[in-house]
Image: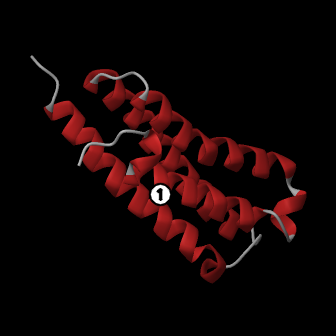
Amino acid sequence: MVAKRFEDLEAYQLAEELKREVYALISTGPASKDFRFCNQLCDSVSSSPKNIAEGFGRFRPAPFAQFMEFAIGSTMETKVGVKDGIDRGYYGPTRAERALSLAERSIQVSTKLMLYLKSQIRS
């Protein structure tokens, strides 16, 4: 299936779902009072869908693949940030489980898309 809009991409949909989950995770409790922590986590989690959208808008496999690399890196940063919140005692592992699972799935799907795009680059 050819995506006509970036919103049709599973990678984008998962990145958006992760973003909403992380926002909910840090909106209450001790995490919500640590503004630096919240800002760093919001920056990383919001970066992924933006990079996917921007890459899609480049209309060529090579730049799209590069932006997918950025999106994957941001999702990995988000995953570490969510784990850091557990370590800080802001929320428990059970509360963070969905965000961590979404991050892992997002990385997997985005990596597959990136590898596909790289296979389409003409040498």
Name the residue: 45% across, 34% down. 70
Coloration of the structure image = secondary structure
Compared across the picture, whether 32 is left or right of 58 comes to right
From the viewer's side, name the closer residue of 74 and 57: 57
Determine whether the residue tagged by mark 1 lies in a helix, strand or loop: helix
Q: Please name the amino acid that badge 1 sits on.
A: Leu
Compared across the picture, whether 38 is left or right of 98 comes to right
Name the residue: 40% across, 31% down. 56
From the viewer's side, name the closer residue of 40 and 84: 40
Quarter residue 40 falls in: top right
| Above-or-below relation of 113 to 88 | above
**Count of numbered marks:** 1
Quarter residue 39 falls in: top right
Compared across the picture, whether 97 is left or right of 65 comes to right
Name the residue: 44% across, 40% down. 6
Name the outermost residue toward the right: 33
| Above-or-below relation of 19 to 63 | below
Give how far across and how far down residue 20 sits, in percent: 65, 60
Name the residue: 33% across, 56% down. 108
In the rendered image, which residue does mark 1 sit on?
A: 14
Give how far across and how far down residue 49 sits, in percent: 53, 43
Name the outermost residue toward the left: 123
Name the outermost residue toward the front: 4
Residue 84 seen by the camera: no
